[in-house]
Image: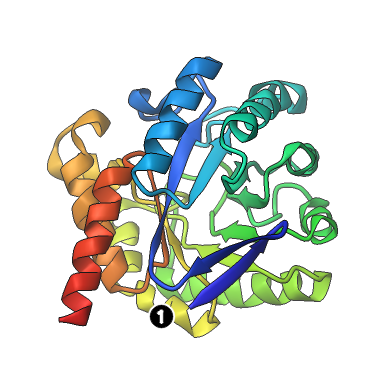
Amino acid sequence: MFTLNCKGKLLVLEEPGVMGILNITPDSFYEGSRLNNTTAILKKAEQMLSEGAVILDVGGQSTRPGSERISIDEELNRTIPAIESLLKEFPETILSIDTYQSKVAKEAVAAGASVVNDISSGDMDADMITVVSSLQVPFICMHVKGTPGSMQAAPQYVDVTMEVLDYFIKKTTRCKEAGIEDIIIDPGFGFGKTITHNFQLLKKMEVLKLLDKPILAGLSRKSTVYKTLGVTAAEALNGTTVLNTIALLNGANLLRVHDVKEAKESITLFLACQKA
């Protein structure tokens, strides 16, 4: 069991939970996830919360392979009004801000977000770890090799799982030394990894439990699913459910998804099987 202090709201992970993705972007890889106005954002949030999401992850910067970095001002213009509207409508909701820019993290937490989710674990903004420590919120650290613009240019590993484990040993030590109390680790499926790397990492993900931190798995509708199946991201829900189930079997505590209902059903069936 893991307990995370989200600005006074306790998130207790006695069993796996679901993080719903709210993309306030015009260019995320899955077209069906793009939200471009307040009405759409609130409608999707209401659906996800009713289906059992324990966190909603708000992002204003696409980090799909080949994406280009937007300005801090543009990212703030997309995310801050969304966070304010979400908390006005759903005040008890735990929101995370999906950003690798420390100023955005700081402003988002000031607006009401209570978790910071950084695809680079602070590597793309030297101030991020210090800022998160000062905010005293949980920090989701993800492994990525390279940047979104370059990460899929022939990534190489000797042993992807052990390299990711070594990275997190060092990164969690750095975060603890900085004063960050609650750390969640995300192996970074699809970020600087080939499809084969992703399957190798998923297969051996249980190794990351050595870190004694909650593990977040983000596999939803990614190219590992749809390219392997020869379908599109729009047709990748069934494949996502299969990989989410494998992630649960291998130690995932949080599933970051576009489709909350189906992820929640995977967890219910997984738990029923575990208790049988």
User: Would you place residue 117 above or below residue 166 in this image?
Assistant: above
Q: Position of residue 60 (x, y in %)?
A: 60, 29
Going 51% across and 43% down the picture, which residue do you hit?
56
Q: Position of residue 61 (x, y in %)?
A: 59, 31
Q: Position of residue 135 (x, y in %)?
A: 81, 55
Q: Position of residue 126 (x, y in %)?
A: 80, 52
**Is 74 placed left or right of 271 in the picture?**
right
Quarter that holds the C terminus:
bottom left
Going 76% across and 47% down the picture, which residue do you hit?
125
**Is 88 placed left or right of 254 in the picture?**
right
Nearest the eye: 255 or 171: 255
Q: Secondary structure at mark 1?
A: helix
Q: Amino acid at mark 1?
A: Val
Going 61% across and 50% down the picture, which residue do you hit?
117
Res 65 seen here: no
Nearest the eye: 1 or 118: 1
Res 58 seen here: yes
User: Would you place residue 10 above or below residue 51 in this image?
Assistant: below
Going 53% across and 15% down the picture, which residue do you hit?
37
User: Would you place residue 108 above or below residue 122 in this image?
Assistant: above
Nearest the eye: 74 or 162: 74
Which image quadrant is residue 107 in? top right
**Is 241 placed left or right of 63 in the picture?**
left
Residue density around tag 1, few if under 14, some if 14–19, many if 20 or more, within 10 Å = some
* Residue on which disc 1 sits: 207
**Is 27 placed left or right of 59 in the picture?**
left
Which image quadrant is residue 261 in? top left
